[in-house]
Image: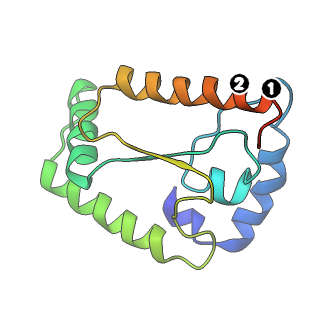
Amino acid sequence: ASAIAVHPEVRQALVGVQHGFRITPGLVADGRDMASVIFPDAVLKVFLTATAKARAERRYKQLIAKGISAKLDDLLHDLRERDARDSSRGAAPLLVADGAKVLETSELTIDQAVKTVLDWYQSKISEVARGGSN
């Protein structure tokens, strides 16, 4: 996906389509620039991160569970290359969006990460309901 994302004309063509998904009651958008470029006015912006090693290990386990052979070192190398490419691309480089909460997940389970994000969401919705900032 990231190899396609380096083309500004492709990215721009998709923005309108992505905005079309923003309807009541809202949505959860997952992607490397959803909060910084596509939905910068989101009620809650979360930047999920983990070490390259943790992400490679997770991917390795996913592939093995599907019966797909993989080498951990290759996955780690590919992730580091993608991170470097995404961080340095001209169109919407990978970055933490203004106002985003950062969640470091290297040592968290999926359930722990989900609970944290849901807690943040409930807190944010309560704040907005009280007339706080978006």
Q: Secondary structure at mark 2?
A: helix
Looking at the picture, tell me which residue is in the foreground, 80 or 99.
99
Residue that label 2 marks: 126
Q: Within 10 angstroms of label 1, few (less than 14), some, or many (20 or more) residues?
A: few
Tell me where residue 107 appears, x and y as whole percent: 23, 36
Quadrant hosting residue 112: top left
Quadrant hosting residue 43: top right
Vertical side of 69 occupied by 88: above or below = below
Residue drawn at 62 percent across, 69 percent down? 92
Looking at the picture, tell me which residue is in the foreground, 27 or 43.
43
Vertical side of 130 occupied by 14: above or below = below
Three-letter amino acid code at the position of disc 1? Ala
Q: Verify CB contact (< 8 Å) between mark 1 and mark 2.
A: yes
Residue drawn at 65 percent across, 33 percent down? 28
Query: Does residue 104 appear left or right of residue 52 in this picture?
Result: right
Tell me where residue 14 appears, x and y as whole percent: 76, 55
Residue drawn at 31 percent across, 58 percent down? 79
The numbered mark at residue 129 is 1
Tell me where residue 74 appears, x and y as whole percent: 19, 57
Residue drawn at 47 percent across, 77 percent down? 88
